[in-house]
Amino acid sequence: MRHGLLFILAAMIVCASSPADAERHMMRPRVPSDKLAEARSLKSPLPSSPEVIEQGKAIYHGKGTCFNCHGVDGNGNGPAAAQLNPPPRNFRHHGFWRHRTEGEIFWVIKHGSPGTAMVGFGSMLSDEEIWSVIQYERTFAQRHGRRGMGSREGMGPRMGPRHKAESPHDREDSADE
């Protein structure tokens, strides 16, 4: 009995992931290094609008099947997520949007992510559909760490160097950094 408890405890220690592990996972790029410059140069041709967001929402919850892994609320805990290693990205985490460009996100949706369960959707979704999904996914983070969200060029409205004003949400989230 004692050996059984020790085995379970050891397994729990090995399998446990700390907040630091989650943060490292969030920071790790999913675009291969030889494609990173190409991905970062990609910019959405779509205007930021409620209509585009609604189109993205329909694709996310429909033919894109994004919710199966990334969750209905974009928090990375969809019905298939428990079986995936590494886990799906959490679109509600401020670090997700802060540490990559929209072009990187586009590239991963279109081509997939080597070493993960993220397959490429380029044969199923048009480029326009992928860009609209990105606009919808961005809405998941709006109340979760807006500070720095999309600080790289091209990440959307009110994001970038010319919009440095802090909101009350910024101060709340700064403790997370």
Image (cartoon, rainbow, N blue to C red):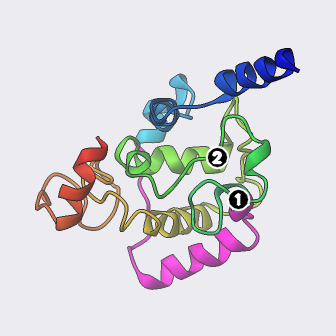
Q: Nearer the viewer, residue 168 or 55?
A: 168
Provide the secondary structure element on which disc 2 rests: loop
Q: Position of residue 138 (x, y in %)?
A: 44, 63
The boundaries of the magenta stretch are 41-68
Residue position marked by numbered label 2 in the rendering: 88
Q: What mark, if any, has residue 56 been given in the picture? A: none
Q: Nearer the viewer, residue 131 or 146?
A: 146
Q: Position of residue 159 (x, y in %)?
A: 25, 59
State the residue lying farthest toward the top.
3
Q: Position of residue 17 (x, y in %)?
A: 58, 31
Q: Is residue 53 magenta?
A: yes
In this rendering, the answer to whether 126 lies above or below 59 is above
Q: Amino acid at mark 2?
A: Pro
In this rendering, the answer to whether 47 lies above or below 166 is below
Horizontal side of residue 149 vs 18, given as left or right: left
Residue position marked by numbered label 1 in the rendering: 78
